[in-house]
Amino acid sequence: MEKAKVYFTNLHTTYDENLTQKLARLITTAGIGDIDFEKKYAAIKIHFGEPGNLAFLRPNYAAAVVKVIQDLGGKAFLTDCNTIYVGGRKNALDHLDAAYANGFSPFSTNCHILIGDGLKGTDEVLVPVEGGEYVKEAKIGRAIMDADVFISLTHFKGHEATGFGGALKNIGMGCGSRGGKMEMHSAGKPYVYTENCIGCGRCVKICAHDAPVVTDRKAFIYEEKCVGCGRCIGVCPTDAVIAASDESNDILNCKIAEYTKAVLQGRPHFHISIVVDVSPNCDCHGENDIPIVPNVGMFASFDPVALDKACADAVNRQPVMAGSQLDKMPKVHGDHFKDSAPATDWRVGINHGVKIGLGTDQYELIEI
């Protein structure tokens, strides 16, 4: 396969060009204008940051991307899907509150925010995965699949389960509905944490397969009847229904790659990763530790696999930040992400993305 072009710029500025202007120049040079945006809906997938976390991308970056798309005639919106875990983004209302609190609003970004999988994380589209080995039909947020063009704007950072959180993680996991996230994280079926259960029966009403039952004011899920759609998780008012979260990290990475392919296949897409504040863990945490390496720069490509590989290579060339989590770990793998999170191997997701035709890990780095 021909090498993918990955464009890069460092974080140095001049009196004539600030960082957001430089980002606009980067993505323009990388060819975002080759996409026909005229009167097209353009979904910009971004992580708004879990409340308490301060490592997420500032909304100024999103505003710069929005302006480029609008100048090209597109109708841009920012989007993400609800989380499967209990936190500040588990439903659309809380999710929007978190986005606004972290500075994302129509006033700061000049576009609207749509939560991709609806109020309770159950508004999804079943999307066939071409060549999928682990996923045959991905459960993707409906608003994301309704868009004509897909753009990912990613904060590249470490991740405790996938090695790093890059474009594939932002797209694959981020665009999955609550049921989709359960499918990626879980080999098993959801279960009921009875201490939180109030016996309301909403899980019983939403299930088409009679898997949940309520006995003595507590719910129970028959695993043999459950098909793993995750709708019971979305409707539970007390977060008593919990995903198993027992999938291996290698298979999790593979499923994320297959979900990414489901999101991207059949429509124009473009990808941007900003490698700053490279925290050791995901922005889904309600906190962030100090970065594991110094800030690197901004990257853009039409190929999300090549983009992730280029960003990972760039991070691995950086010195370890003194006092960081990585600095305190044994250096035995020759890889910052593997040393920071020894239980996972980020290369599995890259290799699987290549295998299923999502992209290539061979790239030409073009610095501007």
Image: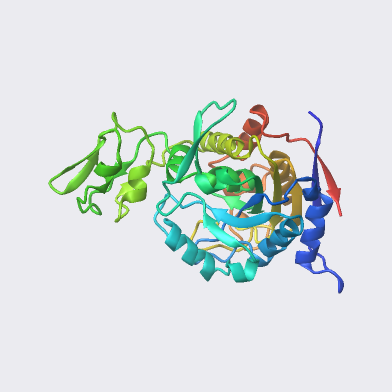
Q: Nearer the viewer, residue 245 or 216?
A: 216
Q: Nearer the viewer, residue 260 or 327?
A: 260
- Report the number of discs: 0
Q: Is residue 88 visible?
A: no
Against 44, residue 355 (above or below) is above
Answer with left or right where residue 77 lies relative to residue 23: left
Against 187, residue 78 (above or below) is below
Image location (x, y in percent) of residue 312: 70, 46
Image location (x, y in percent) of residue 140: 51, 42
Quarter assignment of residue 310: top right
Quarter assignment of residue 297: bottom right
Picture residue at 56% right of the left edge, 30% below the top: 129
Answer with left or right where residue 180 lies relative to residue 331: left
**What colouring style does the render use?**
rainbow
Picture residue at 63% right of the left edge, 65% below the top: 59
Picture residue at 70% right of the left edge, 54% below the top: 74
Answer with left or right where residue 163 lies relative to residue 86: right
Q: Nearer the viewer, residue 17 or 155?
A: 17
Picture residue at 65% right of the left edge, 51% below the top: 42
Image location (x, y in percent) of residue 53: 53, 64
Say which quadrant the N terminus sits in: top right
Say which quadrant the C terminus sits in: bottom right
Q: Nearer the viewer, residue 304 or 343?
A: 304
